[in-house]
Image (cartoon, helix red, strand yellow):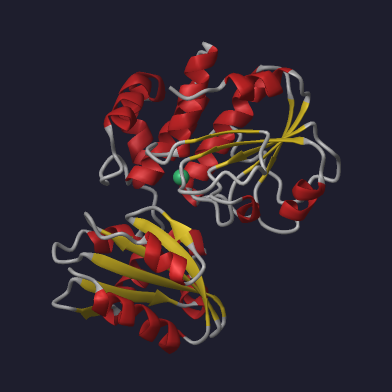
Amino acid sequence: MDNFSKINEILASVKKVVIAGHVNPDPDCMGSSLAVYSILKSMGKEVTLFRSDKYPYNGAFLEYAGVATETVPDFEPDLYFILDSATPERTTEPFFTKMAASKSRKILFDHHRHKDNGFYDAEVTDEGASATAAIVYRWAKSLGHELTKGEAEDICFGIFGDTGGLRYASTDKEALSIVADLAEKINYGDFCSKFFENLPENWFAMFAEVLNSMEKYKDGKVVFFATTLDQLRRFNLAIDEIDPYVEEIRRIGTVKIIFRIREVEAGKVWKFSVRSRGDIDCIPIAQKFGGGGHKNAAGFTFYGTLDEGRKAVLEIAETLDL
Ligand SMILES: [Mn+2]
């Protein structure tokens, strides 16, 4: 059992809370942040929700999806409540520097692999949790808090994000039982439809182009694909909207490891995501380039040309026992 007593002790003594998650927020970051926002509001706290960047587009239907601000709060809160962020720095600048310099209390819920470096006054981190949203659920249960429909959707949204809609190896008994517990509250079919069936038509047009330029190595076990800023412009899509391409490519039976590369600064800065199946550990690959993540999904930022990036990861792919 997690120990939420220190978390709750701190919460009892604070009024103004700032919530934040990690850079390039994913559905788990968004869902767990919104659920905590809603629960803290119901406890009578003054809550500000900070996001470093746009939330995933398919979460727009969630309650409070619109309340987050991208402006670093200019006041001193009593508490920083951080979610799903493997390191405090991943809350991004200038937010991180302000938080680090602040004497305010700091707490964390997370499920990434990391070392406790004493940054937080209290934290509940469980690498075994399928999603940070599952930890939020445990916390709500420990409080005896009756989840609202909105909070239930937030939590399912987070779990769906990190388990690919209850499909990935990260899907455990707890993830299934949380979603089962919340299924009636959220209207499951309706929720799935909002989560999965909401793609703009251009999404497919760009995907066709991406598939045509996709590279395969090692008998199709290694796949490498890149998306460029020019493509996003031409197809009028935002970078988060094309996130699911990698999930579609995972469905190719032969694929063991995927390198998904997104151009973030023309010709010189690239976000690499590494996705794997089964026992292939992505973490050491990402760490080699200063990144991190989970066993089957990790990432890092690469500075250089696309060719240099391709060469660097393919050298690593060569050494993998696939
Ligand atoms: Mn997560």
Residue lying at 49% horizontally and 50% vertically, measured from the top left: 26
Quadrant in the rendering for residue 169? top left
Residue 258 at x, y = what percent? 30, 67
Residue lying at 71% horizontally and 46% vertically, measured from the top left: 69
- Viewer can see residue 180: yes
Taking 232 as reference, is 192 above or below it?
Answer: above
Taking 141 as reference, is 30 above or below it?
Answer: below
For the N terminus, which image quadrant? top left
Quadrant in the rendering for residue 193? top left
Count of residue discs? 0
- Viewer can see residue 243: no
Taking 87 as reference, is 202 above or below it?
Answer: below
The residue lying furthest to the right in this view is 75
Residue 305 at x, y = what percent? 49, 87
Residue lying at 55% horizontally and 14% vertically, measured from the top left: 143
Q: Nearer the viewer, residue 6 or 220?
A: 6
Q: Nearer the viewer, residue 112 or 150?
A: 112
For the C terminus, which image quadrant? bottom left
Residue lying at 21% horizontally and 54% vertically, measured from the top left: 278
319 on left or right of 2: left
85 on left or right of 48: left
38 on left or right of 112: right
Q: Nearer the viewer, residue 124 or 207?
A: 124
Residue 217 at x, y = what percent? 21, 80
Taking 200 as reference, is 301 above or below it?
Answer: below
